């Protein structure tokens, strides 16, 4: 049943991406960082189109009358609202890009078109095209008597409309044959390859009259159906995944981006070939793929163009002279990325790989870095004849091919590799190291909120708990036993383990706070998560609000819960922070200071996380670590620079940034706190 405090998931996601776009527009951000946010906005939108638009089109075919449980909207209504929102934001995206590029001219960084080029540059470009580009180009006709050209997903192309007596004739030229950025001088004047090809289209088709030409980019549905694949128990799932990925690459087009329209006849012909409606067509002023902007930082080293450099700090209370397992046995450690270095965790793995007393290493992998030290350590451990069990989740969206390759390498090294359960992904971040010595068996556990990825540990905020607590280790062992037998953990002592032992525990915490509030006592609940959409969780939070529980939520992305709705969520405050780092850590806080429980977790408050995935949360039992996590959430809640305040209509309003000594930028302050701690201890 829909409630007045529910927000449609798709529209909430668009609200989130609007917050990203605001960072591209924010004049307080350095210029190249503004450009990066423009690229992040587009990259986010690409994934949204592939996954959510693709899913909605599927629902329109399969269940056209099925209503969204939160908003009551049918698939067609949702799709209409999604596409309308995308069209509405497009001019803002274009304007942000061009305003930033205009200001970068002061630094010699200029996106040049052929008409803007100097005579010398035009001469160079003509020769460059003739010698370096034209021999590499392939021409693909689209016409009545031709097999249909297949536009690859997100491939930038040039399309030409050619004069023909036999009807509409189009020709497609893929623009990925060479480096995309063509530098015209040492300071930063550049041209994009697709623009150069577009300019020389008349020369390419010099024996045919070109009626029109444009740069285009097709986005295809990225949804995969695992249901039928899960029934095949005899085939290695890597082989099944490869087939599914091939099928995904051939899925239907769901969006067409163009630099400008062709004439009406050609446009109608193209749209019919792609089976797209007019609403799925977007004319964009910016380059259709903005990923190239990340390379522009190499053009000019001026420090004011980038955020001030932040170096992950090394914890002074972690000795480089003492092995990590001894230090973890002495006390729990909570690492906070990217403010602190991931190196202690990597040291733990490296040491375990060569320690003769380590008997086994067990770990769950969802996403890892391209040159992964984690994979290296696991392979080394297996080569040293340790038992190494690695769960590799092959269904990590858009990392499937990488994970297939990692699984193969781990198997070749002698690791035992298993995959996620047939009907649910394993999203947990869990490590268990077992060491057998003269003193008996010792276990060391790591539970994280983010992936085992050295690259993202520098740009995502995440927490990593290292502990030797026996009860947590016993729970971790049960998790790996369950994964190895394709079963679910039904009971735990300390860990929260979805799908059976996480949501119920959070609901119980909320019930406990409701009881305190109804007795007239102070009651409190807070969470820092990426997303919330689960109806049962939202209903319980609304119930707690009505009972008088003070609730504070820090939610980066999808937020289907509206705060401040009279009679329902008046005691709920929600903020979202979008800044230089991607907020990714999940923290749950229940109770007032004298009875506070604090957990870190891999799970958001979404039904897929709570009921359809294996997720793990861990209690912070050390009072100092509990307070560390609480201070982190409180600092986010006090942010008055990058915070967006949730409104009772589901929108978020950027706070008016405070300057001077009262300014609080939570991410900057957490970094400065890490620096201060490193310097004064």
Image: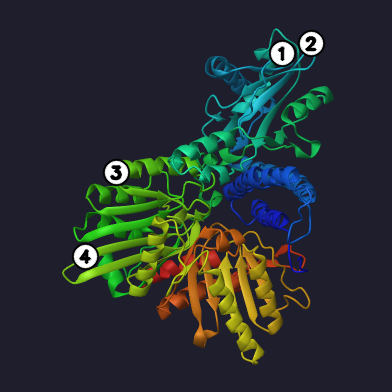
Q: Which numbered disc covers residue 145?
A: 1
Q: Nearer the viewer, mark 2 or mark 4?
A: 4
Looking at the image, residue 218 sits to the left or right of residue 3; the answer is left
Residue 215: x, y in percent?
A: 68, 28
- In which quadrant of the rendered view does residue 648 lie? bottom right
Mark 1 in CB contact with mark 2 (< 8 angstroms): yes
Looking at the image, residue 130 sits to the left or right of residue 281; the answer is left
Mark 2: which secondary structure? loop
Mark 3: which secondary structure? helix
Which image quadrant: the C terminus?
A: bottom left
Q: Which numbered disc covers residue 436?
A: 4
Q: Residue furthest right?
A: 264
Mark 4: which secondary structure? strand
Q: Which numbered disc covers residue 413?
A: 3
Mark 2 in CB contact with mark 4 (< 8 angstroms): no
Mark 3 in CB contact with mark 2 (< 8 angstroms): no
Q: Residue furthest bottom?
A: 520
Q: Is residue 503 above or below residue 407?
A: below
């Amino acid at each position: 049943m829909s409630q007045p405090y529910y927000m449609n998931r798709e529209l909430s996601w668009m609200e989130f991406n609007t917050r990203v776009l605001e960072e591209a527009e924010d004049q307080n951000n350095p210029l190249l960082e503004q450009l990066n946010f423009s690229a992040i906005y587009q990259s986010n939108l690409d994934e949204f189109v592939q996954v959510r638009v693709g899913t909605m089109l599927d629902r329109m075919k399969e269940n056209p009358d099925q209503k969204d449980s939160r908003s009551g909207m049918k698939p067609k209504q949702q799709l209409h609202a999604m596409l309308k929102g995308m069209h509405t934001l497009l001019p803002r995206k274009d304007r942000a890009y061009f305003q930033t590029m205009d200001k970068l001219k002061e630094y010699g960084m200029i996106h040049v078109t052929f008409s803007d080029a100097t005579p010398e540059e035009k001469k160079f470009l003509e020769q460059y095209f003739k010698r370096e580009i034209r021999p590499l180009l392939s021409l693909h006709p689209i016409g009545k008597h031709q097999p249909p050209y297949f536009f690859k997903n997100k491939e930038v192309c040039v399309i030409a409309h050619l004069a023909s007596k036999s009807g509409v004739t189009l020709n497609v030229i893929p623009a990925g044959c060479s480096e995309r950025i063509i530098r015209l001088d040492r300071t930063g004047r550049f041209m994009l390859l697709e623009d150069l090809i577009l300019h020389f289209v008349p020369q390419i088709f010099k024996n045919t009259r070109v009626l029109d030409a444009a740069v285009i980019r097709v986005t295809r549905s990225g949804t995969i159906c695992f249901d039928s694949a899960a029934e095949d128990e005899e085939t290695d799932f890597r082989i099944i995944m490869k087939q599914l990925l091939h099928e995904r690459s051939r899925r239907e087009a769901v969006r067409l981006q163009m630099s400008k329209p062709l004439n009406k006849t050609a446009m109608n012909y193209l749209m019919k070939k792609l089976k797209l409606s007019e609403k799925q067509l977007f004319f964009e002023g910016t380059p259709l793929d903005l990923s190239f902007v990340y390379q522009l930082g190499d053009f000019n080293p001026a420090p004011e163009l980038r955020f001030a450099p932040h170096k992950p700090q090394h914890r002074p209370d972690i000795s480089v002279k003492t092995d990590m397992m001894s230090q973890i046995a002495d006390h729990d450690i909570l690492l906070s990325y990217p403010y602190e270095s991931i190196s202690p965790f990597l040291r733990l793995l490296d040491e375990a790989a060569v320690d003769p007393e380590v008997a086994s290493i067990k770990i769950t992998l969802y996403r890892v870095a391209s040159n992964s030290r984690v994979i290296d350590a696991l392979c080394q451990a297996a080569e040293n004849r340790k038992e190494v069990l690695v769960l590799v989740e092959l269904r990590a969206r858009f990392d499937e091919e990488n994970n297939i390759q990692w699984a193969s390498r781990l198997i070749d090294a002698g690791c035992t590799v298993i995959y996620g359960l047939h009907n649910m992904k394993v999203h947990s971040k869990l490590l268990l190291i077992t060491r057998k010595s003269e003193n008996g068996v010792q276990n060391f556990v790591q539970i994280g909120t983010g992936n085992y990825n050295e690259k993202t540990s520098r740009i995502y905020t995440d927490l990593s708990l290292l502990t030797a607590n026996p009860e947590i280790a016993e729970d971790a062992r049960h998790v790996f036993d369950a994964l190895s037998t394709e079963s679910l953990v039904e009971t735990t002592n300390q860990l929260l383990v979805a799908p059976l032992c996480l949501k119920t525990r959070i609901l119980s915490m909320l019930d406990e706070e409701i009881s305190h509030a109804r007795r007239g006592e102070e009651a409190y609940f807070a969470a820092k998560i990426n997303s919330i959409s689960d109806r049962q969780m939202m209903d319980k939070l609304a119930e707690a609000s009505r009972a008088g529980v003070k609730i504070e939520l820090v939610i980066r992305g999808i937020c289907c819960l509206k705060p401040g709705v009279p009679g329902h969520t008046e005691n709920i405050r929600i903020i979202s922070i979008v800044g230089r780092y991607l907020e990714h850590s999940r923290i749950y806080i229940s109770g007032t200071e004298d009875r506070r429980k604090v957990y870190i977790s891999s799970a958001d408050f979404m039904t897929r996380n709570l009921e359809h995935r294996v997720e793990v949360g861990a209690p912070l039992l050390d009072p100092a670590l509990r307070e560390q996590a609480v201070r982190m959430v409180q600092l986010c809640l006090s942010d008055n620079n990058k915070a967006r305040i949730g409104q009772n209509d589901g929108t978020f309003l950027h706070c008016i940034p405070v300057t001077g000594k009262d300014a609080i930028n939570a991410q900057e302050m957490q970094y400065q706190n890490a620096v201060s701690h490193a310097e004064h201890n």
